[in-house]
Image (spheres, rainbow, N blue to C red):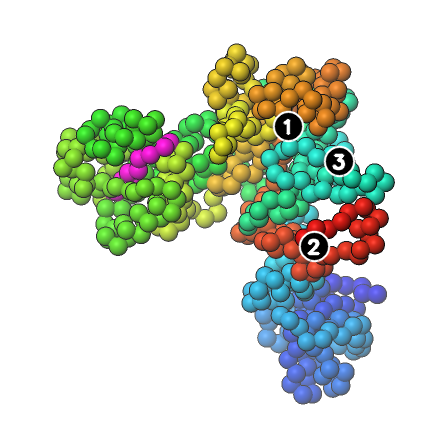
Amino acid sequence: MRREHCGELREKNVGQRVTLAGWVHAVRDLGSLTFVDLRDGSGVVQLVFREMPEAHTLGREDVIRVTGKVRPREKPNPALTTGAVEVTVETLEILAKSPPLPFLPDEEVKASEETRLRYRFLDLRRARMQRNLRLRHKVTLAIRQYLSAQGFIEVETPMLTRSTPEGARDFLVPSRLEPGKFYALPQSPQLFKQILICSGVEKYFQIVRCFRDEDLRADRQPEFTQLDLEMAFLEDPEELFSLLEGLVAHVFREAIGVDLAVPFPRLPYREAMLRYGSDKPDLRFGLEMVDLTDLLAPAGFKVFAEAAQRGGVVRGLPLPGGAHLTRAELNRIEESGKNAGLSGLLWLKVEEGVHSPLEKHVGEGVLANVAARAGLASGDLLLLAAGPEQTVAQALGELRVQLARERGLVPQGKWALAWIVDFPLFKLSAEGRLESEHHPFTSPKDEDLPFLETDPLRVHAKCYDLVVNGVELASGSIRIHRRELQERIFKILGIGPEEAERRFGFFLRALAYGAPPHGGIAFGLDRWVMMLAGENSIREVIAFPKTATGACPLTGAPAEVDEAQLRELRIKLDL
């Protein structure tokens, strides 16, 4: 047994005999004297071995147990919390030896991600990864404490369910007992949490595993974790916002000691797209876009006029101090715009007057009005783009973030949170088909119900996103609680009565038996912890993540299975 922990020893322990156990973090062999840094979950302390032959055999990551006396350290190390003391070892027990390491589990590991994940048990020994795991624990603990105090109860929902369309591919699990039939792993507990509300569970939450078979990126995994919550008798999102703001503020305070100002701003979707080119804008800095269609479309320049005639827009992105950019820098920015989908970028700068290649096409007076509307000062630059509204907004939005980062305009240590509201209920797919902007169980705004069938793209949704520093942290909505309205939405989405009954019959039955108004939200827990930890990938805050291709180097999954298992499931591979 060990009686003490390495990282807890201080000057008050001098003279005490202690028993420690942990991993060998470093060895300095000086012959008759050997220094070893011993590490456990609490930290590192220096051990001193005098004339002890067994100490010469120790290597990195060996597991040992020692007894000895704490004494003052001759040369204190201020970088360690235990740097004022050391332990003179009296007995040594080697509990386990480690072979040569594929990489050293130090703070900055130089191994590839593939190697790190293959030897994840080594990677997780790093102090940084231990901090991330402990931070994740603090976040989930704070969530459970807060919601429990607010009267929510945690209820588990099934991992094996039926396949329902929710925007991504399902992972399918074959049934041995019913050959030819499949379970699906849940993309979210959406339907089950609504059924729980129908079942009289008025305040539900769950920290739940979700599964989506989709292309991966830094903040996506095939399996991920959400905080899901739902409330009965909820009709107005504002009723939920104060509760959620309290939750978020509580987690930030408990996890990283940051106090957030509440309430968070509310920003309509259309305004977010106009000003920032994104429905998850980073509000830590300015660089707000400005609409210039009415000034420039009739000004005589063909590109602007044609964009407006096709229903497009002309917008500008101000760049303070950008008037001094070189031609090469402007060319690089223009190339970035093309990569984001723009056919080209034009510019206007204020430098002893207003100057632009457009001057001969639209005149000085129009340019002066443009500069005034954009709020340009001397030395500023305005980037101009024309085209379809969605393309221009997205491209300038991406350019806004890129330029802010390159020019050091993003303040560090600042947290900017906002609710994005008034989303459209539907959007058009690439094939021109109506799709749900969020999911098909989102309630339309009451005042827009008359337009559901006649002008569906005009309908707004009772849904909301919480964005933090340009990242979507949570997404939720007031749900449809009447069966007849849910069936109308299915019909608009091309889901006929037979298909609706086949795929959602169990859910529609629940709505028919006295479902109260309700709504909720889902937080991306992995993203939340990633942001709090200051990481750039959710793989750094998940104990056993997959690679960007969905593989698990640690276990070798996905892998082939025995032919006998396939026969039992009545599955034949045709590759």
Structural distance between the alpha carbons of marks 1 and 3: 21 Å
**Image check: 455 left or right of 382?**
right
Return the mark for residue 520: 1
Structural distance between the alpha carbons of marks 2 and 1: 34 Å
x and y, in percent, of residue 304 in the image: 26, 32
| Residue plotted at (29% across, 26% down) | 309
**Image check: 341 left or right of 463?**
left
- The foreground one among 33 and 446 is 446
- Name the residue furthest bottom: 31
* Residue ID for mark 2: 558
Region in magenta: 380-389
> Of tags 2 and 1, which is closer to the observer?
2
Residue 480 seen from this side: no
Sequence order check, earlier mark of 1 and 3: 3
Structural distance between the alpha carbons of marks 3 and 2: 21 Å
Q: Amino acid at mark 1?
A: Gly
| Residue plotted at (75% across, 20% down) | 509
Number of labels in the image equals 3
**Image check: 264 left or right of 247?**
left
Determine whether the residue tagged by mark 3 lies in a helix, strand or loop. loop
Return the mark for residue 161: 3
Local packing at callout 3 (Cα closer than 10 Å; few below 14, some 14-19, many 20+) is some
Q: Main secondary structure of the magenta part?
A: strand
x and y, in percent, of residue 390 in the image: 41, 33
x and y, in percent, of residue 501 in the image: 71, 23
Q: Is 7 part of what is drawn in magenta?
A: no
Q: Amino acid at mark 3?
A: Thr
**Image check: 387 left or right of 237?**
left
Considering only vertical position in the picture, is 470 above or below 3? above
